[in-house]
Image (cartoon, rainbow, N blue to C red):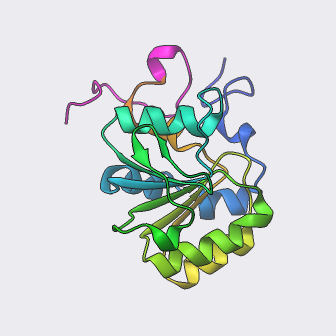
Amino acid sequence: MGPGPGPACDITLNSALTPEQRARWQDPDVIRRLLRESRTLAIVGLSRDPVKASHFVASYMRHEGYRIIPVTPHEGTILGERTWPSLAEVPEPIDLVVVFRRASECPAVARQAVAAGAKALWLQLRVVSPEAAAIAEAAGMPVVMDKCVKIEHGRFGGGLRFAGMNTEIISARRPGRE
């Protein structure tokens, strides 16, 4: 295997975005900053079903110390947190809106995120909506698109390399040490 990531482990192969779009909406510096600075995540489309990706991601992020706010039309609780039918009804500040919805629904979610005063918008893996990104960016919000917040947390936190994945990060530092 030569220098750099090979076809079998190149993380960018998982993206549906063009190289220009990846540079815009998958910037590693923006991802690192959002993961470092965000504490409260409103997860739009969070499912009660523990087999669903949204539930697994929320459970992981909660375990990693993030506050999770479930945004779903279903009343009740998920992961011990009260659910909210929309971002507009969440009664506390939101650092990051993580979206598990169809791309066609994302512009409306972006508008809600802007109205709620959220600091950033994250469209999960395979969720691509340039229109939603334009809405968020017009309000000054950073956007990440077509990336999984859990995978990126593991990638930049050091957890993935121990599972044998090429994270495209070279470092002699152990996770958690500066």
- Quadrant occupied by the C terminus: top left
- Quadrant occupied by the N terminus: top right
Q: In which quarter of the image is residue 122?
A: bottom right
| Rendering coords of residue 20 (x, y %) | 71, 63
Say which residue appears at 49% left-offset and 39% top-offset: 58
| Total number of numbered discs in the rendering | 0
| Rendering coords of residue 93 (x, y %) | 34, 68
Q: Is residue 173 magenta?
A: yes
Q: Give the range drawn in magenta.
A: 161-178
Q: Is residue 123 magenta?
A: no
Say which residue appears at 58% left-offset and 46% top-offset: 46
Say which residue appears at 80% left-offset and 65% top-offset: 104
Q: Is residue 83 above or below residue 116?
A: above
Q: In which quarter of the image is residue 156?
A: top left
User: Residue furthest toward the left?
Assistant: 178
Q: Is residue 65 left or right of residue 89?
A: left
Q: Quadrant of residue 118?
A: bottom left
Q: Nearer the viewer, residue 30 or 48?
A: 48
